[in-house]
Amino acid sequence: MKPETLSFFEKVYDVAKQIPYGRVTNYGAIAKYLGAGKSARIVGYAMNGSHGKDIPTHRVVNRKGLLTGKHHFEGTNLMQQLLESEGVEVIENQIQNLEAVYWDPVKELP
């Protein structure tokens, strides 16, 4: 399928699949990369709808590094456990040292 024919959700998933292991990005950064800077909430909806697909949704957090999507994962701490298994430190539902693990698709992708 050509990129211009992909749905917005599919474009979000394509970006999310490229987030490197041990790194995180935020909803707004994905929206901005896709040319829809005011659509962070729609990116969140896409992440919520990605269950059953091979999308590393645990690597997408809010702009402050909060695990705002954690309630969409099975169990109480699965999102945090997945991030910690990749070496990302999380305390009280917030990524620690966010700037060190932050991945910006606008800067990293063509």
Image (cartoon, grey):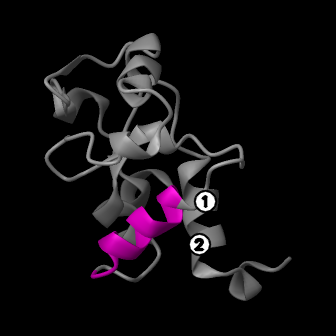
- Residue 3 in view: yes
* 38 vs 53, nearest the viewer: 53
Q: Secondary structure at mark 1?
A: helix
Q: Secondary structure at mark 2?
A: helix
Q: Which mark is residue 13?
A: 1
Q: Is residue 78 above or below residue 103?
A: above
- Residue 103 in view: no
Image point (71%, 47%), residue name = 52
Q: Amino acid at mark 1?
A: Tyr
Q: Is residue 1 magenta?
A: no
Residue 84 in picture, x, y percent from top left: 38, 15
Image point (63%, 50%), residue name = 51
Q: Is residue 22 above or below residue 109?
A: above
Residue 35 relative to residue 8: left or right: left
Q: Amino acid at mark 2?
A: Phe
**Dot 2, crowdedness within 10 Å: few (<14), some or many (≥20)?**
some
| CB within 8 Å, label 1 to label 2 | yes
- Span highlighted in magenta in the image: 38-48
Q: Residue furthest bottom?
A: 5
Residue 38 relative to residue 94: left or right: right
In which image quadrant can residue 58 be found? top left
* 103 vs 76, nearest the viewer: 76
